[in-house]
Structures are given as structure tokens and as C-alpha cells.
Amino acid sequence: MKSIIDIADRTLNCHREKELVDLFKSTLADQGFNNFAFSTFSENGPNMIAADMPDGWGDYYMDQNYWMIDPVFDSMSKVWEPHTWVSLVDENTADDVKTFMLEAEDAGLKHGHTVSIAHLGQKMNLAVSARENLTEGAERKMLATSFALASMFSARMTMIHRRDCEFKCS
């Protein structure tokens, strides 16, 4: 893994949202994650800030109203602590939710976790999925790494948006 200082330096050198998202995507890929979504919670489904999902999954997810049964989305409004997706499903989970989770796994969204941070006065969530199952020790490290990366992304995204607003409003 690149040092946290190197990642922070590269983050600060991003001056456009697309640059930042591309850096974030490549940094997560370096960590073994193949998909991510940054979003905020809404009663009408997730408000995406940035995402890299399997082809067609985002549209399919919204068309099927999966956010209404998705335990990962549901946890966005309730859980602040970093958590794995498997911790959201147990033997008492409804069959339609279990079916959804299997469908998400088939689409390539497996071995995931979510971290939450404050972003522009609201809660922002980073959901990421890994190519391979993580061991318990590696899992905790990845939750901490994701939290640090999400915090940097959010801080820089806020700076970019404020700068752009000041430029447009001047």
C-alpha cells in the first residue's frame, strides 16, 4: 500500500472532481477493491456522489427499487460504525433480502463493507466490495483504510465544490 502521506499528497493535488474520483478508484483498486459507491441517504434511494459499479448494476438496482430491501442501504441511516455486509444478514433475514444479496454477489458485489463519515452537514457512506474474502485481521485493517480514504475524499471534494462555488458566485 502506498503511504497515507503519499495518498494525501496526491489527493490534495486533485483540482477537479473527475481527477479525485479517478484517484480514489485507483487507490481502492490497489487495496483489492473492485467496486465502490459514495452516497448519502435519502428516503427515495441513495444520492450518488461518485461510484464505480458493475456495468448496468446501478440502473438495474434503481429500476427494481432494490434500495427498499437492501440491508446495506438500510444501514446507511442507522449505523455509523464501519461494518461488513455479511454482518447485516442472518438466519432471520427475509427471503427477498437474501435473494437480493445473492443477486448482488452474482453481479460482482461481494465481500463488502461500509464506512460512514460526516460530509457537508450530512452523513456520507462509502460502500466497497473486494475481489476476495478477507481474513478477520485483514478485514479490520481494510475498514480502517476505507475510513481514512473516505475522509480524505470527502475533505477534498468539499474543497473542490467550495472553490467552484466561489468562482461561479464571484
Image (cartoon, rainbow, N blue to C red):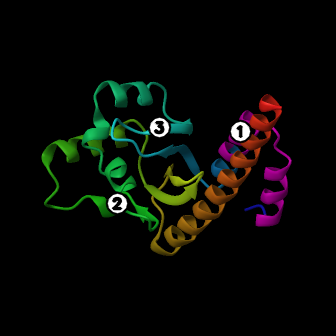
Query: Which of the labelled discs sits on residue 22, or is there none?
Result: 1
Q: Find out whether the residues at labels 3 and 2 contact each other: C-beta distance under 8 Å.
A: no
- Gap between marks 1 and 2 measured at Cα: 29 Å
The quadrant of the image that shows the N terminus is bottom right
Q: Between residues 64 and 154, which one lies in front from this camera angle?
A: 154
Query: Which of the labelled discs sits on residue 47, or is there none?
Result: 3
Q: Is residue 166 visible?
A: yes
The boundaries of the magenta stretch are: 3-25
Q: Secondary structure at mark 2?
A: loop
In the image, what residue type sits under mark 1?
Answer: Asp
Question: Which is more N-terminal, label 3 or label 1?
Answer: 1
Task: Tell me which residue sits at (44%, 68%) in the image.
Answer: 81
Q: In the image, residue 162 lies at what x, y percent?
A: 74, 43
Q: In the image, residue 115 lies at what x, y percent?
A: 50, 60
Residue 91 image-quadrant placement:
bottom left
In the image, what residue type sits under mark 3?
Answer: Asn
Say which residue label 2 marks.
78
Q: Is residue 16 visible?
A: no
Question: Which is more N-terminal, label 2 or label 1?
Answer: 1
Q: Between residues 48 and 118, which one lies in front from this camera angle?
A: 118
- Gap between marks 3 and 2 measured at Cα: 16 Å
Q: Secondary structure at mark 1?
A: helix
